[in-house]
Amino acid sequence: MKKLTVTIIAIFAALTFFSCKDESGTYVEQLYTNAQKENAIRACMDACADTAVKHLCVPDGFYSYANETYRIDYAPLQSSLFDTLTNHGYGNLIDSLILRTNRLAESCGSQVGTALHTAVDSIPITDHDALVKGEYDAITRYFELYEYRYLKGAFKSPVSVRMPIFRVNEVWNEMIQRYMQYTPVPLNFDIQDYIVEEMLESILSEMAEEEFLVRTDSTHRTDAMKLLGVD
């Protein structure tokens, strides 16, 4: 009887040891329900969205935050419109357009934040484990996949309303007028669509950065997000 008891204890200890050494991630599946995982995923999305808005939709957010990483600079126009205007002494118009555009984007925090949280509330969560145990930006990329079209549409309204307020249209029209004086080549460029897409890409990029911190730094996690931690 004594021998049997010792054997059982040994087996239990071995099982406990190997279960603790399990690095496959399957313990997440065993310890948490899908409801808890979904709660963590949505909490992460909300937190990342809040951080992105807090970093970018503030004065100098798009224009100079993170060493100008998110500045809307009209890169597709550098070799056409911008070079032509610069060569003829209208570089000041370029600087004005870039500054006004970024100030426009920075002023959209309320509408951008509302759109992001609406998307978080409505997004379907299907593969919980893939998102919980995925790459550092798995949740953000999933969010982008399902909500990009909705968010792009939601961003259009505040951008459209603010373009005349920040005189983006006025400066843009003057630039096109000057440009056409020096070249017969037409310029096919949807400025509003460009601004919306640049804003959305920057927001998503900043969300991915925050998701990385959520997964690797416990100070960026609430209790609801604790199962996402890998640190």
Image: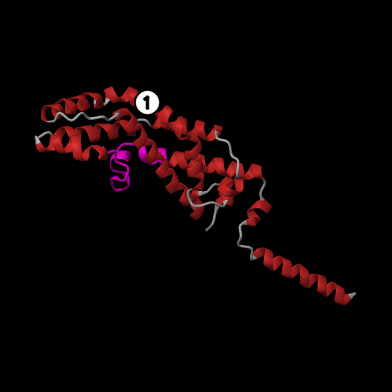
Dot 1 crowding, Cα within 10 Å, few <14, some 14–19, many 20+: some
| Above or below, comparing residue 149 to residue 9 in the picture | above
* Residue ID at (29%, 29%): 191
Q: Position of residue 205 (x, y in %)?
A: 40, 44
x then y, percent, for residue 177: 16, 25
The residue stretch that appears in magenta: 52-73
Q: Quadrant of residue 83?
A: top left
Residue furthest to the bottom in view is 3
On the image, the x and y values in percent for residue 155 come to: 40, 29
Residue that extends furthest to the right in the rendered view of this protein: 1
214 inside magenta stretch: no
| Residue positioned most to the front | 184
Query: Can you say whether 64 is above or below 109 in the image?
Result: below
Residue in view at x 38 percent, y 27 percent: 156
Name which residue type carries label 1: Pro
Question: For mark 1, what is the residue?
Answer: 158
